Amino acid sequence: MAAPGAVTGDVVIHQGDNLEVARSLPAGAFTVVYLDPPFNTGRERTRAVETVTWARDAEGETDAATRRGFHGRDYERLRGDLRTYDDRFDDYWGFLEPRLVEAWRLLADDGTLYLHLDYREVHYAKVLLDALVGREHFLNEIVWAYDYGGKTRRRWPPKHDTILVYVKDPTRYWFDADAVDREPYMAPGLVTPEKAARGKLPTDVWWHTIVPTTGREKTGYPTQKPEGVLRRIVAASSRPGDTVLDLFAGSGTTGAVAAALGRHAVLVDDNPEAIAVMRARMPRARLATDVP
């Protein structure tokens, strides 16, 4: 929550298909773009598969048969290779790819893209994003580890998500380590008392509980992410007054955190339940239809 007297940011909520909304937004407008898409769990999808026609050939003409990445990399061959490993590949990535393309267009020159997935898709996403935007734009792989809920005894229980981090310009992206919350040292006896009291900067492995069922921030939305995880992302990769974007906003955690930190936020979701949860959670937020 915002400190007393703190300046809070504006939050604008769009209800609708996030690809259509993204295409209506101005390029380079967002310092942070956070994407938490539905995980490809094998359940049947009902969305129509969409095609991408943004590639150009050597003469600058659109060539959908040989799509290429933002830096001219051959992309269609990569898709074909991955399709041989998973016959559901086109269904999921046909939905997600055009949204990644738009997210990259919307990212500011000093901006950072966070893509939140689980173990089923993250390895495909890493290879595909490297091809789409260039491996040199990859910054981090964050592992968010938690220990809550049921545990299978038939394998190692999966208790983490992965967040891939890409920067628009590797030479000028914004990252403020001093703005990030600190963690206790795992072996405080090995550091000075002053360091132990201050805590250490988080690494790329974040131990953080999921939203507790009886917690203050619980909204009841099934895929809600904890504020602590989003607070680190927004605090590290944006400044007060910057604008962040969440195309799969769900319960609105990104907007709630951004506003409390003095950032502005644009949230998009087509689920009426999500819109209702966000409006109850953030009474000051405005619907895009109400914005002049």
Image: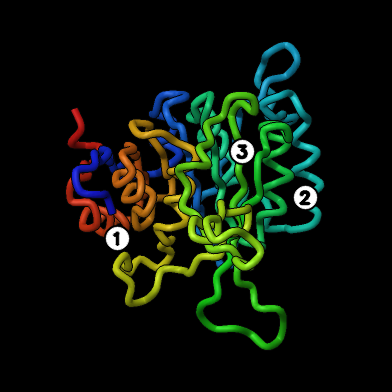
Residue 173: percent from left, percent from top: 56, 29
Residue placed at 53% from the left, 42% from the top?
177
Q: Is residue 69 above or below residue 14?
A: above
Determine which of the numbered discs, if any, sits on residue 82 in the image.
2
Residue linked to disc 3 = 166
Residue 137: percent from left, percent from top: 67, 33
In which quarter of the view is residue 281 placed? bottom left
Residue 207: percent from left, percent from top: 56, 65
Closer to the N terminus: mark 3 or mark 1? 3
In which quarter of the view is residue 160 placed? bottom right
Please tell me how many numbered marks the rendered image carries.
3
Residue 166: percent from left, percent from top: 61, 38
Labels 3, 1: front one: 3
Classify mark 1: residues with Cα within 10 Å, few (<14), some (14-19) or many (20+). Answer: few
Classify mark 2: residues with Cα within 10 Å, few (<14), some (14-19) or many (20+). Answer: some
Mark 2 vs 1: CB contact within 8 A: no
Residue placed at 72% from the left, 58% from the top?
87
